[in-house]
């Protein structure tokens, strides 16, 4: 695996792990000592978790788009017929930010 692909894969994995962690930590605990707490007590934590989800996924998407965008421009300059495929790859990298936004909306809905 080339260095750029490894970095892009690592960024995607980091964004996914961040979003998953925030989703799990932001979810209310069904049983335990905090279950008897008032309903409004976890709203601040859920909003903080949503902010971390958006920030982590946006940073991961920015790094992934930078890597794939540079590679896409290099490929298009050599073979212009690869434009469609290159834009799909860049779009998939941008999807990471959208996943973080979706997780944030879910967390805010639970707050």
Image (cartoon, rainbow, N blue to C red):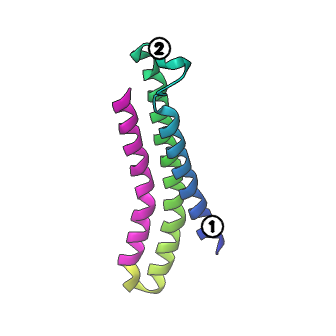
Q: Residues within 10 Å of mark 1 (few under 14, many from 20)?
A: few
Magenta-drawn stretch contains 44: no
Q: Please name whichever residue, 31 or 67, is drawn nearer the observer in this view of the structure.
A: 31
The residue furthest front is: 31
**What's the residue at 47%, 73% (across, down)?**
72
Q: Position of residue 76 (x, y in %)?
A: 44, 80
Q: Secondary structure at mark 1?
A: helix
Magenta-drawn stretch contains 98: yes
**What's the residue at 39%, 44% (across, down)?**
101
Q: Is residue 81 above or below residue 97?
A: below
Residues at circles 2 and 1 in contact by the CB criterion of under 8 Å = no
Q: In the picture, which quadrant includes the N terminus?
A: bottom right
Q: Secondary structure at mark 2?
A: loop
- Badge 2 or badge 1: first in the primary sequence: 1
Q: Is residue 78 above or below residue 47?
A: below
Q: Splitting the image into 4 quarters, where does residue 91 fall?
A: bottom left
Residue with the mark numbered 1: 6
Residue with the mark numbered 2: 37
Magenta highlight range? 84-111
Q: What is the magenta segment's predominant secondary structure?
A: helix
């Amino acid at each position: 695996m080339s260095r750029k692909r490894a970095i892009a894969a690592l960024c995607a994995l980091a964004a996914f792990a961040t979003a998953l962690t925030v989703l799990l930590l932001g979810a209310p605990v069904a049983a335990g000592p905090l279950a008897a707490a008032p309903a409004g007590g976890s709203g601040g934590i859920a909003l903080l978790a949503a902010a971390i989800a958006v920030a982590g996924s946006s940073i991961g998407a920015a790094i992934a788009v930078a890597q794939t965008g540079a590679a896409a421009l290099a490929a298009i300059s050599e073979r212009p017929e690869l434009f469609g495929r290159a834009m799909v790859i860049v779009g998939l990298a941008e999807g990471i930010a959208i996943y973080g936004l979706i997780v944030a909306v879910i967390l805010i809905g639970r707050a």
